[in-house]
Each structure stands twice: as C-alpha cells, then as structure tokens.
Image: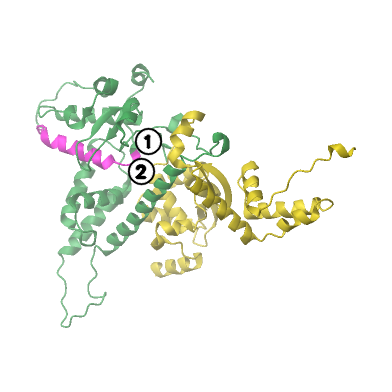
Chain colours: A yellow, B green
Amino acid sequence: MSQAYDVKVPLASSLQQIVGALLFGADRPLTVEDISSCLKSVADTDKADEASDVSIFSEASPNEIKEALGNIAKDLSRMEMGFELVEINGSFRFETQPCCGRWVRNLLKIDRPNRLSRPALETLAIVAYRQPIVKSEIESIRGVMVDHMLKALMELRLVRIIGRSELPGRPFLYGTTPAFLEHFGLKSLKDLDDIDPTLQRSKPSERKAAHKKKMV
Amino acid sequence: MSLQTLLADDYKVDLEVFEGPLDLLLYLIRREEVDIYDIPIETITKQYLAYLDVMRMLDLNIAGEFLVMATTLMMIKSRMLLPVEVRGIEDDTDENWVDPRLDLVRQLIEYKKFKDAAAKLLEKETLRAEAFVFGGEKPTFETTDADAGLALADIGLFDLLTAFQEVLDRTQHSNILEQIEPIRWSVPDKMEMIISRTKGGQRLYFSKLFTAESHRIEVIVTFLALLELLRLRQISLYQNVAFHDILILSAESHHETGQSPIIGGGKHVSSV
C-alpha cells in the first residue's frame, strides 16, 4: 500500500451530525439504544486509528443522544425542510410532513390507504385503554358483540392475544400490538392519556378487584 | 364493475349492522338535544322502538342486543312510574332510591368517551396516512374485495334511517285490507335509476327520490337499492348539516365535493 492512497476523511464534529447521518442512512427506525451501540462499536473497532477522535462520541449517554435527537427535530422544523423527525414506539426516523402528503402521494403514485371504520376504531380504543381486556368487557362497553370485529382487528395485526384471564373459563386477554402504535403514530401507549386521561388504563390488579366488587 | 354484473347477483340486502343499541341511544339523545344525565325515558323509548320498527321493516339483521336494550328501556320506564317512598328526613342514601336510569347513563357516558377517543384516533390515523418515509414506503392494510362492502357500518346508518322514516311518514299509509298489488318495483330497477340520476356527477338529494305519491313499497324498494349501491360502493352519501337532507353522489365524483362522505366514500377496511 502506498502512502499516496491514504486519504483522510474528515470526521464529524458533533454528536448531532452523527445521529442525523445514522437516521438518514438507516433502512429502519432507530432506537436510542441502536444509536448508542453503534457509537460504541465504532470506537471499539476503530481503536487503532484516530482513537482519540471517535471515542469521544462513544461515551455519549442516552440523554445526550436524546438531546441530539431533539435538536435535529427543532432544526428541521425551523428550516421548513418538508420532513421531520418522528418518534413512534420508541424508534426515530425521518418522515415527510403530513401537510405535504398530497404531493408526495402524487409523485410516488400512492393511493390513499384504507381507513378503519368507526366501530373498528371504537373497539380498538376500548382495547387500547383497557388492555389487558377480555372480550365480554369490550362487549359490555360497546353494547354489541365484537367477535367479528376482534377477529378482523387481529387479522390487521392491530390487536393480539396477550394472555389468559383468571376468570372462569379462562378467556383470552386482548391487547394492542406495536403495529397499533405505528398505525396511529403514537410514541407509546402513554400517548393515549393525552387523548383522554379519564380513560386511563389502570393496573390489571386494580381492575380485577373492581370486577369482584361488581360481581358481589 | 358494470351494472350488468351487479344485476347478475341474487338480490338480498343483508347488512350487518355494527352499530349497536348504545349508538342508537346516543344518536337519539343528540338529535333530541336532551340531557344525557336526565334522559326523558318515555320519549327516548318511544323513538327507540320506532327505529327498531324501521329496521325490521327493511329486514335489516337486527341484533339481539337491540331487543335487550328495548326491554331495558321499558323496564326503566316502568320503574320510573313506581312511587318513590319518601322518608321523613332528607336522607339521600342510595338504598332509598336509585335512579333506575343510573346504570344506563353510566354505560352511555363511558361508551361516549370511547367514541370520542376513537374520533381522536381517527384524526391521528388521517394525519399519519399523509406522512411517508424515504421511498414512500408505508405499512398499509390489506383488504380483500370480498369484504370491501360494509362501509355502511361506518357512521350515519341512523341518519339514513331517519331520512327513510321521514319519507315513509309522508307516503300514504297503505291499508292492510287493500288489494294485493302486483310487484311493480324491483331493487335492480331502482339501482339503475339511482345510478343514471347520479351519472356524471349529478347531484341527487335523498328527498328527491320520492314524492308524496310514492307507494310505501316503492319507498322501501328504493331505499334497499340505495343501501345495496352503498354496499357495492357505487355511491357516496353526504350531509352538510347533521339531520339535514342527504346528498347522493356517484362514487367516482365524490372527490370534487371537498366534503367527506358520511357513508361510503373513501376506502374503508370494510368489515372492520
């Protein structure tokens, strides 16, 4: 190897730059842990050369990474770039802004996606707020049978069986899936409380106690 | 889908109604502008039963829950009529007298909250559908054509039934002893009529489908044709103001109206 080919690539000067590059280059949404482990891995493998330069970033704490993410989000919205940083289910990625949707849709020839019907949304809302929940509870809230609806929601992978209840007959307990968060663009189930805190999910044990009271 | 292929099918409108008795009650409460905490049980019961009659007349598959609710309403009504035992002291304990409506009101309020939450989820879903990642990829639902029809279960079924009921009230009440009429109307014929009257973006109002002279059977057949077209997604329905006349447009032209249809319209994950 001759010296002439040894060209040095300039290194990133800020954590924000690296985080931005990772998000842009990734083919999937990234979690804070993904970013953190990447930073560490680079510092380990590249120890031989420029060790001092890359190791600074390997020590970035989750909070520092979150701060970098926050700054990227702020900068993007300030610059009106038409895309933004989105957090869904604990993962971050760049997405085009909804206000530009019609143009992107036209360019890429994408049809409007199917929407859920109102009864489906209602059933889903009940499952989301009250999970883990048995079918009979959903039915008593909605006042109609929900077999068909639950089956359809499960086929769409928005709802799944997450266990068995201790109630007689050991009925299935239902809950939402990661795809549910994805479909509605929620950071986590906690986002549901912003919609209506009074529907808040209470702890399963509390709910069980409440049930017993009702039955007496 | 051409009309010919539609006509090849055997006609039986069989709509699965996913809206339940609670939806109907909330609808009535909203329409009558009554206080949910102080429901005039007599009026609401009467109207509720009237809706059941309409649904029965249309041969809609009335779920058992509707009948259960009907008995609940009548039970509450009768309990409201019972004299309240008045104790000497203003002793407002629950043991003395519990408003018979209490359980129902609680259920309605809880359900309404979930309905509101569902509306917020719809907002999020709509926004979400407008965002794309690099390359435009997007996780989407898969739907099969087989279940692409039940958008009627979305919202507005009761609006439609209201409109239907109004028209029915205006038509002459056929005497039961009247001679049996030959069958002069068919669902396919009426479907064809609606399609031709909405062709090329023509605006057709629900109220204009019928005249005061329309025969009851004709009204029912026309209504069934409308439901069938909705199910087949050939038309969309719009309503500018709640409880007003309903506009019928052919499904292709609904994009230009700038309104969102109350029924039909955009693709829905059908049976869901």
Q: Which residue is mark 1?
A: B150
Residue stretch in magenta? B153-175
Residue at the location (50% across, 64% down)? A204
Residue B90 painted magenta: no
What x and y, as percent, mark residue B88? 15, 82
Q: Where does the C terminus of chain B fall, quadrant-wise? A: top left
Give the letter of the chain under mark 1: B
Q: Identify the main secondary structure in magenta.
A: helix
Residue at the location (47% across, 66% down)? A208
Of A120 and B54, the residue lying toward us: A120
Mark 1 touches mark 2? (CB < 8 Å): yes
Number of numbered discs present? 2
User: SS of the residue at dot 2?
Assistant: loop
> Which residue is farthest right?
A1
What x and y, as percent, mark residue B209? 18, 27
Q: Amino acid at mark 2?
A: Phe
Q: Amino acid at mark 1?
A: Leu
User: SS of the residue at dot 1?
Assistant: helix
Residue B171 painted magenta: yes
Visible residue check, residue A75: yes
Q: Which residue is mark 2?
A: B18
Give the letter of the chain under mark 2: B
Query: Which mark sits nearer the N-terminus, 1 or 2?
Result: 2
Q: What is the CA distance from the residue labelled 1 to the residue labelled 2?
A: 9 Å
What x and y, as percent, mark residue B89? 17, 83
What x and y, as percent, mark residue A3? 88, 40
Residue at the location (34% across, 59% down)? B110
Looking at the image, residue B224 sits to the left or right of residue B10; the answer is left
Asked if residue B148 is positioned above or below residue B33 in the image, the reply reads above
